[in-house]
């Protein structure tokens, strides 16, 4: 009988990842609910699952960014690092976002993802948006209101939105309308964005002044330009 009870007890324990709270993430003590030590781990796991960031992108960190290639890249690294470190202090400010602007391969995406990964490690929710892929999918389904509002709602309402390669490729009127709807919502609700873009500020304003002016007001704009600044190539060269 004791052996049977012991086996039953072991089976019950195996049902839970955390035996202390039985996966509720809170421990009930009388009339009080106390946060279990596993809660922040579960929150971080949930954030990562919902982020859309792949395992490869999870490896983009500040500690493996080759910032010594050039002074502009060093400066961009410092701006990104300080933004991530001070995020919770500036989250509700008007200028609560950051935008990396520059040529192909200058490290914009790596730095954007390094910030996102740092924030997620602090249990701050970040959603990744590959601009060209998402815009294409939204335009293809624009007549499906349920799909359109569900997908747009995900990007509009996320605590932090990472937009990778904004306005990459040919930009149409439909692209501008979709991005204005998205960024205008985030602008008025003071929801932060992390943006990578190949254009400079002037080019962004030429594409669409409404979108460009909102991003400039929201963001710390970090430009990375120069003949030697192909981070993607130079990071493999041993100087």
Image (cartoon, grey):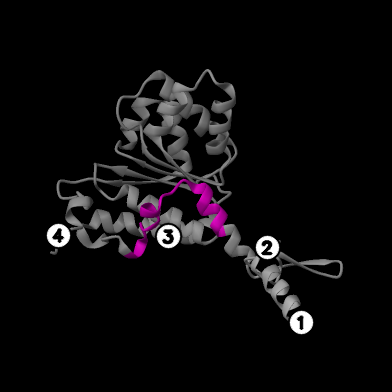
- Residue at the spot of label 3: 82
Asked if disc 4 and disc 3 are in contact, CB closer than 8 Å, the reply is no
- Residue at the spot of label 1: 2
Instruction: Give the secondary structure at mark 1.
Output: helix
Asked if disc 1 and disc 3 are in contact, CB closer than 8 Å, the reply is no
Q: Mark 4 vs mark 3: give the one in front.
A: 4
Residue at image position (58%, 39%) is 157
Q: Count neighbours of disc 4 (C-alpha within 10 A) and say few if under 14, some if 14 to 19, many if 20 or more.
A: few
Taking 62 as reference, is 71 left or right?
left
Query: Marks 1/4: CA distance?
Result: 66 Å
Query: Marks 4/2: CA distance?
Result: 48 Å
First to last magenta residue range = 44-63
- Residue at the spot of label 4: 237
State the image coordinates of residue 183 (x, y, percent, origin top left).
50, 33
Q: Is residue 226 magenta?
A: no
State the image coordinates of residue 188 (x, y, percent, origin top left).
58, 35
> Which of these two is toward me, 5 or 52?
5
Q: How many marks?
A: 4
- Residue at the spot of label 2: 23
């Amino acid at each position: 009988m004791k052996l049977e009870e012991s086996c039953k007890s072991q089976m019950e324990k195996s049902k839970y990842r955390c035996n202390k709270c039985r996966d509720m993430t809170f421990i009930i003590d009388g009339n009080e609910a106390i946060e279990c030590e596993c809660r922040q781990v579960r929150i971080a796991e949930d954030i990562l699952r919902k982020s859309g960031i792949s395992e490869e992108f999870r490896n983009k960190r500040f500690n493996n960014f080759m910032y010594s290639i050039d002074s502009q890249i060093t400066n961009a690294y410092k701006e990104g690092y300080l933004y991530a470190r001070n995020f919770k202090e500036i989250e509700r400010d008007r200028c609560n976002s950051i935008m990396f602007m520059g040529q192909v391969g200058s490290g914009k995406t790596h730095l954007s993802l390094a910030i996102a990964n740092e924030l997620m490690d602090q249990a701050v929710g970040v959603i990744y948006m590959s601009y060209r892929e998402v815009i294409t999918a939204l335009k293809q389904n624009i007549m499906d209101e349920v799909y359109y509002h569900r997908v747009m709602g995900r990007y509009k309402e996320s605590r932090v939105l990472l937009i990778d390669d904004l306005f990459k490729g040919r930009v149409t009127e439909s692209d501008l309308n979709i991005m204005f709807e998205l960024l205008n919502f985030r602008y008025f609700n003071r929801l932060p964005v992390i943006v990578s873009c190949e254009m400079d500020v002037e080019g962004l304003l030429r594409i669409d002044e409404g979108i460009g002016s909102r991003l400039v007001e929201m963001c710390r704009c970090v430009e990375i330009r120069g003949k030697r600044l192909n981070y993607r190539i130079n990071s493999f060269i041993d100087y």
